[in-house]
């Protein structure tokens, strides 16, 4: 399946266990290699207002469907807003 970033923007992001993390805000791309590096997930109600953003390493992305992006349960350490990269 091939999709562009406009199609993915706003897609719900959840962990494999079903925890809702927010919506896809943007993607990080390595300009030297052309590979995706990370996704930014916004949990804010209105962009820029009450906006918390998680950065999740691309290797934590498990599956992308038209309805949601599924990330590893280990992408969000317990009690932290930091994101695991391994």
Image (tube, grey):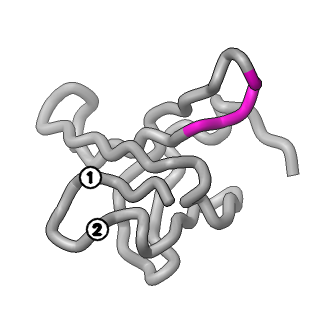
Q: Is residue 23 above or below residue 20?
A: above
Q: Which residue is mark 1?
A: 82
Which residue is painted at 55% across and 33% down in the image? 27
Q: Which residue is mark 2?
A: 77
Which residue is painted at 26% across and 52% down in the image? 82
Q: Is residue 69 above or below residue 32?
A: below
In the foreground, 9 or 74: 74
Q: CA distance from mark 1 to mark 2?
A: 7 Å
| Left or right of residue 41, residue 58 in this image | right
Q: Is residue 64 magenta?
A: no
- Assign a secondary structure to mark 2: loop
The stretch of residues the image draws in magenta is: 33-37
Residues at badges 1 and 2 in contact (C-beta under 8 Å)? yes
Which residue is painted at 60% across and 55% down in the image? 59
**How many other residues sit within 10 Å of disc 1, few (<14), some (14-19) or many (≥20)?**
some
In the image as oriented, which residue stretches furthest toward the right? Answer: 1
| Left or right of residue 5, residue 41 in this image | left
């Amino acid at each position: 399946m091939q999709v562009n970033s406009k199609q993915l923007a706003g897609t719900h992001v959840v962990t494999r266990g079903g925890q809702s993390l927010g919506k896809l805000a943007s993607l990080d791309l390595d300009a030297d290699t052309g590979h995706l590096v990370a996704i930014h997930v916004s949990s804010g109600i209105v962009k820029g207002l009450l906006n918390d953003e998680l950065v999740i390493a691309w290797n934590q992305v498990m599956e992308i469907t038209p309805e949601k992006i599924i990330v590893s349960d280990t992408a969000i350490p317990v009690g932290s807003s930091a994101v695991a990269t391994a």
